[in-house]
Amino acid sequence: MAAKTSVFYLTERIQMTAANTDVTDTIDLGAYVDVADRQGILVHDVDFIVQGEDTNTGNLSQLGAVWTGNATAFFQLTDLNRGRLVFADDRALVASGQLLYDDTNNQASNESDIYPDNFGPTSAQGGRIVINDQLYVRGQMTRAAGANQACNVIVRIKASVISLSQKDFMAIALQSTAADN
């Protein structure tokens, strides 16, 4: 595995207002992934940032203004579109997180994780190799946002473009195809 670029960042934002409703957006990797050159993306780290928004003004708001009660927001980054939030054992899962909001104590707790690629070359351990042409950001919350409020989740991906050997690229392609079923 050889790095073709230095580290760079990809970002995307989803906005949630309704309870128990999936919101999805995509991150296009077509400019970075090249099958002919066995080129993929190495995801080093994924951060999820949660921010409230006053939808009348577009300005940031306190998370406490978003919900009128306890709430949980779930968010995930996958390399396949499953059409729903996935369990932690799904091979398409790149990273996931959640925010727990305690309205009584006006406190929020945020947890996130990234799953290293156990199927790629040894030199990629601690990162996740993606050879699909899109990443999918999906989120859902348990309580509807208050009037004129929204919960925004921004995913920030630290990545680099890599070249893989033919064997490594084929192994990851087969693993990704198997995960598609």
Image (spheres, helix red, strand yellow):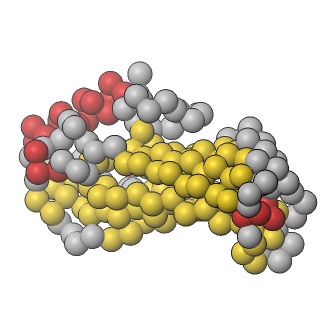
Q: Position of residue 171 (x, y in %)?
A: 18, 33
Residue at 31%, 62% (x, y): give it: 159
Where residue 52 sits in the image (x, y, percent)? 71, 66
Residue 47 to residue 177: above or below:
below
Q: Residue at x 57, y 35 (%)?
A: 85
Image quarter (top left, top right, bottom left or bottom right) of the C terminus: top left
Q: Is residue 118 left or right of residue 54?
A: left
Q: Residue at x 60, y 51 (%)?
A: 99
Where, by quadrant of the figure, is residue 49 drawn? bottom right
Eyeballing the image, is 64 above or below 61?
A: above
Farthest top residue in view:
181
Residue 43, picture quadrant: bottom left
Residue 61 in percent (x, y) is at 75, 72
Q: How many discs mark residues in the rendered view?
A: 0
Q: Is residue 122 above or below residue 67?
A: above
Q: Is residue 32 visible?
A: no
Q: Residue at x 25, y 42 (%)?
A: 117
Question: In the orientation shown, which residue stands out farthest toward the front?
Answer: 105
162 sits to left or right of 50: left
**In this view of the protein, which residue sits in the foreground, 103 or 93?**
103
Q: Quadrant of residue 58?
A: bottom right
Question: Is residue 99 shown to the viewer in this render?
Answer: yes
Where residue 24 appears, as percent x and y from the top left, is: 61, 47
Answer left or right for 175 relative to 98. Answer: left
Q: Nearer the viewer, residue 165 or 127?
A: 127
